[in-house]
Amino acid sequence: MDKILVVDDDLGIQKQLKWSFTGYDVIFAEDRASAIAQLRRYEPKVVTLDLGLPPDPTNASEGLATLEEILELAPQTKVIVVTGNNDKQNALKAIKIGAYDFYQKPIDSDTIQVLVSRAINLFDLEMENRHLSAVAPSMDRILGQSEGILLASRKAERIAQTDISTLLLGESGTGKEVFARSIHEHSLRKDKPFVAINCASIPENLLESELFGYEKGAFTGANKTTPGKIESAQNGTLFLDEIGDMPIGLQAKMLRFLQERVIERVGGRSEIPVDIRVVCATHRDVQSMVAEETFREDLFYRVGEISIMIPPLRERDNDVVLLAKTFLAQYNEEFKTKIKGFSDSAILAMKQHKWPGNIRELQNKLKSAVIMAEGNQIQAEDLSLIVKDEGPTLTSLNLREVREHAESRAIRNAYLVADKNMSKAAELLGVTRPTLYSLIDKYHLEDIKTGV
Ligand SMILES: Nc1ncnc2c1ncn2[C@@H]1O[C@H](COP(=O)(O)OP(=O)(O)OP(=O)(O)O)[C@@H](O)[C@H]1O
Ligand SMILES: [Mg+2]
């Protein structure tokens, strides 16, 4: 049975609500302390909260404080506040703090039943969504919860089931190889070989024989017939990394392999049929290369039947912190260190940094931070990052402007560090949630307000 917590010091109302909520498990509390105790114990989906609580039932302050505490402990709870019949002002205050809805006395059984059942439905729906976004997609090598990375992973997961040629695009260090391997592992070819070759790291004259193999005597030094990378990926996946660096001369041969699915070894005469899934990657802008004729247009369409854009780390919201924590745990194990976490300044610095080298850069910075850190927490300086603080300048109008500027920045920073959680941000700033909201209004930090 779904649990509802009724917080009200009026025993008559308690009784009335008990009758209204048949089909639910109804729990009672008469003041703030017992409400919190019951909340911890029963984790109700819905709370009805009378704002006029003892010690001063004529005033809503104890009720509003209880509301804040409930939302802080269990933000997913749907709280319906119950107010005296002419107390719209406090009802709106409660909504601003995060109450789900409000309801004015006297209590009408039918109306409150509808309110509660809607609240329970919403609670269940939100839970289900949270669950879905936590499990899907199933590409478990690819860490991240940001919109961009979830989108890319879902696309990759779909593509994996097919044999379609895929082009992975993204800056260096964004995880192109991780994606390529994940696609292979989620495909029907997962038990067959995954063969990777980096077109940029092999000299042009060797690349051809690396890829296609060669017959004995094809050139000086070709002492025995050797199959190439393509052949060795038979029935599996071939990952052509840095395809944008493939010499134009070789591109024609690649095109033939991709179109006809046959290869010829260097110096060979017979065609060898191959059954291979091809995944390519590049950090280059191949589209412009096509326009400049340094990359064959027909090959571009052949390798990029579908393409996945992997977003840079700076566009992945809070993923940088999630990844940092994961890598920290790994490096603690690797280097036998016991670093507990990150200081607020380190988190802020990581969120501000642009990460031109993306995840690889994050790994490098973290590795040296873990080795160099003196305390049990990683500081911004350990990461060789600085917290940017464009403080007020001397051209500021007056002291008030200086103060407002500083306060706005502090609020923005706290909001970032708290990962957009208002209660946490308020705590970091040492103010209450309502105070934080009124400061946000005062300084017109609209983007923060709409972010909640
Ligand atoms: N989403 C992710 N979750 C966890 N680790 C990741 C993720 N993306 C990348 N990595 C790690 O980051 C590092 C760089 O990833 P990868 O080599 O796949 O990037 P890349 O785009 O191929 O880079 P480059 O262009 O430099 O070749 C690797 O150590 C990889 O394991
Ligand atoms: Mg790579």
Image: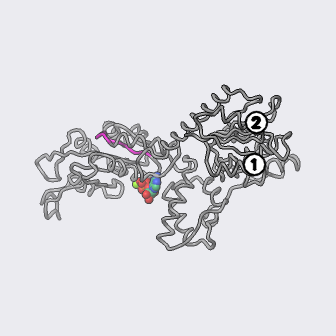
Residue found at x 17% / y 59%: 226
Q: Position of residue 380 (x, y in %)?
A: 64, 63
The residue where tag 2 is placed is 12
Q: How is the image coloured?
A: one colour
Identify the image quadrant of residue 214: bottom left
* Foreground pick, 452 / 238: 452
| Tag nearer the camera, 1 or 2 | 2
Q: Position of residue 166 (x, y in %)?
A: 35, 42
Image mark for residue 32: 1
Identify the image quadrant of residue 277: top left
Q: Is residue 334 left or right of residue 106?
A: left
Residue found at x 31% / y 36%: 298
Q: Is residue 184 left or right of residue 385?
A: left
Q: Secondary structure at mark 1?
A: helix
Q: Please state, as top left, top right, bottom left or bottom right, where the C terminus lies in the image.
A: top right
Q: Position of residue 242 (x, y in %)?
A: 37, 51
The answer to whether residue 174 is visible is no
* Foreground pick, 168 / 18: 18
Residue found at x 71% / y 45%: 29
Q: Secondary structure at mark 2?
A: helix
The span from disc 1 to disc 2 (Cα, nearest Å) is 19 Å
Q: Please state, as top left, top right, bottom left or bottom right, where the N terminus lies in the image.
A: top right
Rendered position, 28 above or below 346:
above
Q: What span is in magenta? A: 161-169
Q: Answer with mark 1 or mark 2, whichever residue precedes in sequence.
A: 2
Tell me if mark 1 has few (under 14), some (14-19) or many (20+) residues whose alpha carbon lies within 10 angstroms of its own. Answer: many
